[in-house]
Image (cartoon, rainbow, N blue to C red):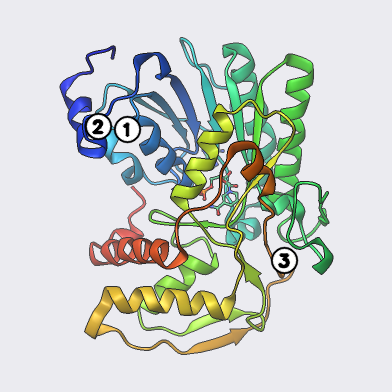
């Protein structure tokens, strides 16, 4: 659309942003891989609401059609059911590629490590090739997993920490896969002048996160909503930083638009919470959502998972200095939004519907 967007988009943008519309000159054609997943679908919402054209790529291995339902019939939206391990051609110009396809699930690292590795490696090559052909700027969603098993003196982890990763550990497929993907980005930048940006994403939560991914937030929310026992792996002292999804989306957009080419950049919540604290945060939110129906949830401790890092705590000074980015959403506020979404999904029986 041009200066006069069609009725449906105009109405949608009005509902979301009052009368505000971005100027035509800043509207772009943007590829998002992993678009049907948790982070990807929130990014698609953000870009569509600002009037961009989005080409969504996903093989629906862990993504959900319902995450993209709002946009399926929109004229500025295209969906390609495609596995990024196969080459992809897009006709016409592409300005930016957000490459998010891939799984961060601890459970999948056990059930299908080869697929995680090949998606990281071959998938990133194919999307970088697309960026090269289209002369598009490329952003990789990398992971705090590349730091591996940080020791106490590596806490918090800054971009200068080079990592402590075991090639044969349980999470190696994800951690080493992302390390290879980062190196591929720099190889394409050097050899083919592709403009690359790398976001090292720390634990993120919010509505539409995968319920069955074996991560602490989704597991604890379901246990608490169902009045089951919290199961903490280890002694409860391991810690995570938990960032709300809208803060991550702001960071990805800022990084993509910035001129910073100095290397990878961390995005995560600066505060750390141990597992006991996470159960308390979840309990507060579930209590608010369930009201009188709330029943206290007991806690049990299981053996720690092998190769699970004891702490994940980002140093985000670089993002603050270079982009002026920092997290804004309070953990209780974000958890309430998330629990409300989980509760609504469970009520609708959608938690098990993968279509
Ligand atoms: P997700 O599983 O919800 O979404 C990933 C999406 O990628 C899914 O829709 C899936 O179907 C798609 N996908 C997977 N393999 C594919 C393939 N071969 N071809 C095409 N599509 C494929 O995960 P998410 O939490 O949204 O994570 C998005 C990205 O961010 C991932 O690369 C992940 O490693 C990274 N990341 C996320 C977190 C987090 O806390 N969510 C933390 C660190 C890194």
- Report the Cα–Cα distance between label 1 and label 2: 6 Å
> In the rendered image, which quarter contains the N terminus?
top left
Residue at figure coordinates x 41%, y 65% from the top left: 335
Indicate the secondary structure of the residue bearing disc 2: helix
Percent position (x, y) of residue 269? 57, 57
According to the picture, the residue beneath numbered tag 3 turns out to be 309
Q: First in sequence: mark 3 or mark 2?
A: 2
Q: Is mark 3 within 8 Å of ligand 1?
A: no
- Visible residue check, residue 84: no
- How dense is the environment of label 3, judged by Cα within 10 Å: few (below 14), some, or many (20 and up)? some
Q: Nearer the viewer, mark 3 or mark 2?
A: 2
In-image side of 244 versus 317 (left or right)? left
Residue at figure coordinates x 45%, y 45% from the top left: 37
Percent position (x, y) of residue 69? 28, 40
According to the picture, the residue beneath numbered tag 2 turns out to be 13
Q: First in sequence: mark 1 or mark 2?
A: 2
Q: Do the residues bearing badges 1 and 2 touch, measured as CB atoms within 8 Å?
A: yes
Percent position (x, y) of residue 89? 52, 16
- Ligand 1 is found in the corner quadrant, namely top right
106, above or below 77, in the image = below
Residue at figure coordinates x 74%, y 35% from the top left: 263
- Visible residue check, residue 130: yes
In-image side of 30 versus 75 (left or right)? right
248, above or below 51, in the image = below
Quarter of the figure with residue 152: bottom right
Instruction: Please tell me which residue lies in front, 223 or 258.
Output: 258
Q: Do the residues bearing badges 1 and 3 touch, measured as CB atoms within 8 Å?
A: no
């Amino acid at each position: 659309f041009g200066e006069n967007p069609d009725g449906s988009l105009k109405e949608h943008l009005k509902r979301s942003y009052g009368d505000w519309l971005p100027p035509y000159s800043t509207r772009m054609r943007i590829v998002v891989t992993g678009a049907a997943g948790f982070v990807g679908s929130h990014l698609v919402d953000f870009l569509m609401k600002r009037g961009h054209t989005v080409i969504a790529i996903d093989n629906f291995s862990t993504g959900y059609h319902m995450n993209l339902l709002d946009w399926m019939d929109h004229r500025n939206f295209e969906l390609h059911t495609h596995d990024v391990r196969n080459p992809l051609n897009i006709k016409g110009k592409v300005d930016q590629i957000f490459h998010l396809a891939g799984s961060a699930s601890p459970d999948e690292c056990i059930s299908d490590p080869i697929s995680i590795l090949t998606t990281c490696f071959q998938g990133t090559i194919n999307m970088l090739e697309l960026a090269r052909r289209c002369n598009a700027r490329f952003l990789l969603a990398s992971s705090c997993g590349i730091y591996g098993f940080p020791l106490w003196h590596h806490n918090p982890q800054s971009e200068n920490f080079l990592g402590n990763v075991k090639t044969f550990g349980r999470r190696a497929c994800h951690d080493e896969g992302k390390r290879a993907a980062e190196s591929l980005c720099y190889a394409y930048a050097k050899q083919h002048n592709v403009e690359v940006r790398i976001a090292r994403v720390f634990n993120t939560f919010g509505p539409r996160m995968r319920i069955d991914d074996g991560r602490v937030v989704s597991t604890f929310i379901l246990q608490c909503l169902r009045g089951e026992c919290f199961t903490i792996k280890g002694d409860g002292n391991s810690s995570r930083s938990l960032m709300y999804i809208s803060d991550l989306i702001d960071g990805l957009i800022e990084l993509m638009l910035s001129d910073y080419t100095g290397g990878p950049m961390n995005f995560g919540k600066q505060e750390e919470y141990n597992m006991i604290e996470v159960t308390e945060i979840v309990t507060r939110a579930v209590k608010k959502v369930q009201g009188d129906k709330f029943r206290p949830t007991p806690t049990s401790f299981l053996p720690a998972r092998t190769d699970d890092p004891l702490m994940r705590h980002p140093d985000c000074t670089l993002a603050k200095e270079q982009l002026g980015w920092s997290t804004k959403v309070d953990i209780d506020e974000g958890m309430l939004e998330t629990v409300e979404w989980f509760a609504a999904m469970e009520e609708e029986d959608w938690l098990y519907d993968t279509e």
